Image (spheres, rainbow, N blue to C red):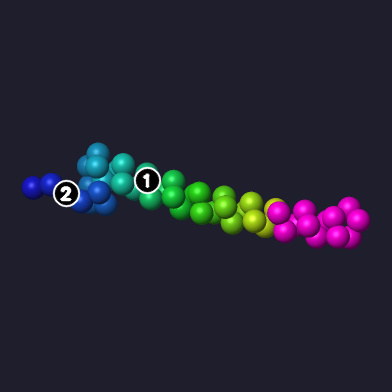
Amino acid sequence: MIKKAGESGALGSVGQLGTAILDMQQHVDGLQKNLDTLKKVKSAIGG
């Protein structure tokens, strides 16, 4: 029987790592958007 990627063993660990990487990428993307916004605000106020 083949286990699904989220269950256990090596495949489970790889699946969890993939999920963690995707989650981190989403957070990084969000932070980048925030930084871009802050840079725009800083420029607008003459910073």
Query: What is the C-alpha distance between the residues marked 1 and 2?
Result: 16 Å
| Residue at (71, 54) in percent of width and height | 36
Residue 40: x %, y % from top left: 78, 57
Q: Residue at x 8, y 47 (%)?
A: 1
Q: Earlier in the sequence, mark 1 or mark 2?
A: 2
- Look at the picture and state if 40 lies above or below 2: below
User: For this rendering, which residue is in front, 12 or 38?
Assistant: 38
Q: Amino acid at mark 1?
A: Gly
Check disc 2 and report its element: helix, strand or loop.
loop
Say what secondary structure mark 1 lies in: helix
Query: Is residue 43 a member of the stretch shown in magenta?
Result: yes
Magenta portion: prevailing SS class: helix
Q: Which residue is mark 2?
A: 3
Identify the residue shown where x is 86% and y is 60%.
Answer: 44
Report the amino acid beneath label 2.
Lys
Residue 9, position as x, y percentages in the image: 22, 42
Q: Which residue is mark 1?
A: 18
Q: Magenta segment range?
A: 36-47
Residue lying at the far right of the rendered structure = 46
